[in-house]
Image: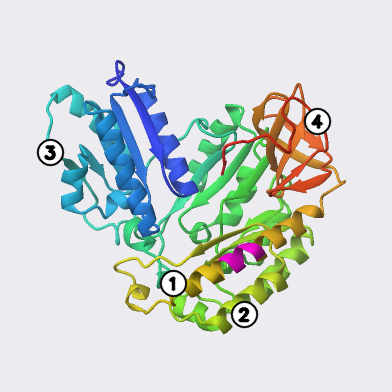
Amino acid sequence: MYPLMDKTYSVHIQGCRTNQYEGEAIAASLEKAGAVQSSDAPDIIVIVSCTITAAADRKCRKLIRKMKRENPDSLIVACGCYAQRMSDSDRVTLGVDILIGNRMKHKIAELAADWFIKNERRSCFSIFDDDIMTDGSWDDLLLDRPRLHTRAFLKVQDGCSHFCSYCIVPYVRGNPVSRDVDEALAEAEKIVQSGCPEIVLTGVHLGLHEDLPLLVRKIGSIKGLKRLRFGSIEPFAVDKRLLESIAETETFCRHLHLPLQSGDDGVLAAMRRGYTTKGFRVITDNIRKKLGEDVHLSTDLMVGFPGEDEKAFENSIRFINDIGFGKMHIFNYSPREGTAAAQMACPPENEVKQRLAKALTEADALHRNYCSKWIGKDVEILVEQKINDTVRGLARNYIRVAALSENAEIGEVLHVTPQKYVNGILTSDLVSKCSPDNCEFPEFL
C-alpha cells in the first residue's frame, strides 16, 4: 500500500549532521509511502529545524514563511529542535500545518497520509512526547541510501544530559538514548549495499552511546565500506577503549572533531564543560600517540562567552596554537533563553567583534599549517562534486582537495598529489576549462 503515491514532497534541512540524517531518513519514509521528490510546488514540505542560536531560530521562521508564501496549498510540516520549542503564536502566524516533536519524526509519512485522506485543513496539528526530558524511546527513522551527499550520515545516538550552561540542546533533544548496535549495523549494511562509500556516525552527544567502540568495529568491518568517521565527539568520551577500536579499524579515517569551546579554565568552568585545558591536552596527546602525529584534530571555539575577558581570550588563542588544531569553527556566543548562561553579563560587543576577527585569523593560519603538511604527498580523496574537468572532495583526514580529472565520477576514490593551498583547499597545479583555483563549488558538510 502506498498512501502517498500521487503526492510530491521536498525536505529542507537546517543545522547539524544529526538533522542531515533525519532529513534524509524522512525523505526515505515519504518515498516508501509512494511520494516523489519535487521542488516544483510539492504537496508536502518538511522543514527540519535548528535552534542552536537565536540566528538559527530566525532562519527557521524565515524559511517557513517563504515556503508558505510560495506554496500556499502545500502541507507544511515542521520538525526538529526549533519546532520542539516553537511558541503557540509562531505555530499560528507561520502557518505550520503539522508540528512534530523530536522523538516523533518517524510518524511524518503516516500523519501526512492521514491529512490528505481526511482532506481537511486544521489550524495546526501537533504531536509531541509527553515529556522529552524523561523519554527513553528511539525515533525509529531508517535510511536506505544517501540522497543529498556522497557520504551517508548515520544517527546512532540522540539526546544529552550534560547541560553545558550555554546550550539549549538538552532541553529540546531530551534524555540520552542509544541506537541498538545490531539495528545500526543493519542500516549501515543497507547503506553500503546502495553503493555509498563512506559513513559518518552522528549523534547529539555521540560519546554517550552505550557501546561506541563496538559499533566502530562492527560498522567499520562491513564489506565494501571504504571510510568511516565521526561527525563530532566530545573530548571526554575519547577513552582508551575507543581509541583502540579506532586504531584497529582500517576504514576509520584519521580525523576527530573535538569541540573545545574555550582554552581558558575559568571560562570552561563557567560553561560547565566538565574538563580543564590540562585534561584536554592529555586527551589530544593520547590521540596522537595512538593514531599518529598526522591525525587531524579539528574543533569549535566560542568567543565572547559571559566572563571572558581579554586575558581569558588570549589564553584560548595560546591554547589552540599549543594543541595545533587544523580546521576550526569560530563563532560568537549567542544567549539562549532558558539556559544558565542567559542570565550572565556578556562582554562588550565591540570587544567581541575584535576577538572574533583575531580568532578567525589564527584559525586560518592553523588550518593552512596543517593542510600544507600534505603538499607533495599522495592524498586519497572521495569525489563529492564535479564541475567540467575539476573534481572536489574530502581526503581521509578531512582536508578539502580540488584536482583535475576528466574521467572521475562522483563517489569515486582518487589518489592525487596536492601542490598548493588556496583559500582553505589543497589544489593540483593544473589548468583546464575550470581550474582548481577558480572553480566555485557550493559548501558541503
Which one is nearer the viewer's eye here, 166 or 434? 434
Q: Is residue 9 magenta?
A: no
Q: Secondary structure at mark 2?
A: helix
Q: Measure the C-alpha gap from mark 2 to mark 4.
A: 43 Å
Q: Secondary structure at mark 4?
A: loop
Q: Which residue is mark 3?
A: 123
Name the residue type under label 3.
Ser
Q: Pointer 2: residues within 10 angstroms few (<14), some, or many (20+)?
A: some
Name the residue type under label 2.
Asn
Residue 304 seen anywhere in this rendered image of the structure: no
Q: Pointer 4: residues within 10 angstroms few (<14), some, or many (20+)?
A: some
Q: Which residue is mark 2?
A: 315
Q: Secondary structure at mark 3?
A: loop
Q: Which residue is mark 1?
A: 349
Q: Is residue 246 left or right of residue 62?
A: right
Q: Is residue 253 left or right of residue 151?
A: right
Q: Earlier in the sequence, mark 3 or mark 4?
A: 3
Q: Which residue is mark 4?
A: 431
Which quadrant holds the N terminus?
Answer: top left
